[in-house]
Image (cartoon, rainbow, N blue to C red):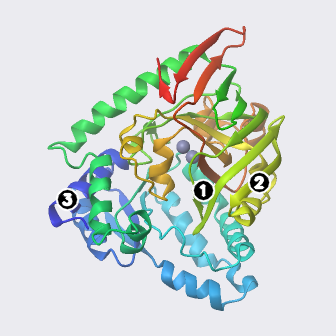
Amino acid sequence: MFDKEILRKFADLVLSIGVNLQKGQGLELACPVEKREVAEAFTEVAYSHGAKIVRIRWEDEVIDKINYSCADEQTLCEIPKWYVDSKNYLMEKNFCYVAIAADDPSIFKDIPSDKIAAVAKARSQALKKFSDCVMANGIRWCVVSVPTPSWAKQVFPDAKNAEELLAKAIIKTMRLDKDNPTLEWKKHIETLDKRAEFLNKHAFSYLKFKSKNGTDLLVGLADEHVWLSAKEKAKDGVSFVANMPTEEVFTAPHKDRVDGVLYSSMPLCENGQIIDDFKITFKKGKIVDFSAKKGYATLKNLIETDQGTRRLGEVALIGKNSPIAESKILFFNTLFDENASCHLAIGKAYPTNIKNGENLSKKELKDLGANDSIEHVDFMIGTNDLSVIGVKKNGEEIRLFNDGEWII
Ligand code: ZN
Ligand code: ZN
């Protein structure tokens, strides 16, 4: 659990560095219902930052689970208009949006994965306008986490003080143990920016990933792709950080130029179900084969969601010595685990990863190789011996990673 002082520091950091709340702006916070004190801290601190209004969207996964068990699929797939409107309202009114990702990683393990996938798909389709806006930085948004008992239990199954241990780990990765977390974040952002700058300067045509576990993959990069890191700019010109913590530098792969095979290096929690030990084969960008030792049905449902979930929408580079990787904790939460390892995402590419992408049409983005889908799901492929080589259009090669770590 976060104590009062940490909670205020946390809210202050997320509102200043994360969504960069401006005076007179509205804030919405999506918060687990059992974490009322977090909502209270955000509300107070937001007003001290000059917020116009603070609205809380209470999330309750226990009720969700009962609904999944008892209601029929067709009814669950009816996404109410008021719900969609309430999300679209945020973009109409230029709210900042903070989401707390603290789910029990296997809460839906006993629900048929077809049912979960159907509801997730219906929701993603209904919210496409909102998620497109978020992915194109139409509003400033930030995903963060707070410890919850059910999540902590999964991360530290044998510990009596699991929630406390998880709180400590989050505090460390968020740099909340430092006297001035905001300053620490500014320094951290600079380091990541330098890497993105290096990659942009070289404008690689594709990346070669190779690892002893069998990963042997060529990832073509989209034409006019841009590498981004922690700090991004929203449509209104104000900068923000969309994920906290974050250690990644990422861009858009070319949807038709991915070839080879990859092996996952960490479990992936997708909609309250766990997929682990999986393998995916690509040909000309498309997934042509896949298998999983655990959660095969969940992976299959994800890949078969729409045309775009058969292709990649993100490639991200993270060294094995990132603070999150060094913690050696498996968080069962993508916000953290993706920052411990190089990763890829199935589904939509961020338009912001293409030069001037926010202002391009769907067709223009597609022609440059940016993938589109109703989904975007990150999964980890980085290992201790991973090598990554950047290849330029003229064939020149630059080694970026040796043994899982940056060498530039
Ligand atoms: Zn990522
Ligand atoms: Zn991603």
Q: Position of residue 199 (x, y in %)?
A: 54, 21
- Marks 1 and 3, how far apart at CA: 31 Å
Screen quadrant of the N terminus: bottom left
- Where does label 1 land, which residue? 131
Mark 1 crowdedness (10 Å alpha carbons): few <14, some 14-19, many ≥20: some
Q: Which mark is residue 6?
A: 3
Which mark is in front, 3 or 2?
A: 2
Q: Amino acid at mark 2?
A: Ser
Mark 3 crowdedness (10 Å alpha carbons): few <14, some 14-19, many ≥20: some
- Marks 2 and 1, how far apart at CA: 29 Å
Q: Nearer the viewer, residue 68 or 78?
A: 68
Determine the image quadrant of residue 316: top right
- Where does label 2 land, which residue? 291
Q: Position of residue 297 (x, y in %)?
A: 75, 66
Residue drawn 44% across the image and 47% down it: 242
Q: Amino acid at mark 3?
A: Ile
Mark 2 crowdedness (10 Å alpha carbons): few <14, some 14-19, many ≥20: some
Question: Element at badge 3?
Answer: helix
Q: Amino acid at mark 1?
A: Ser
- Left or right placement of residue 101 versus residue 205 in this view: left
Q: Quick check: 284 above or below 162?
A: above
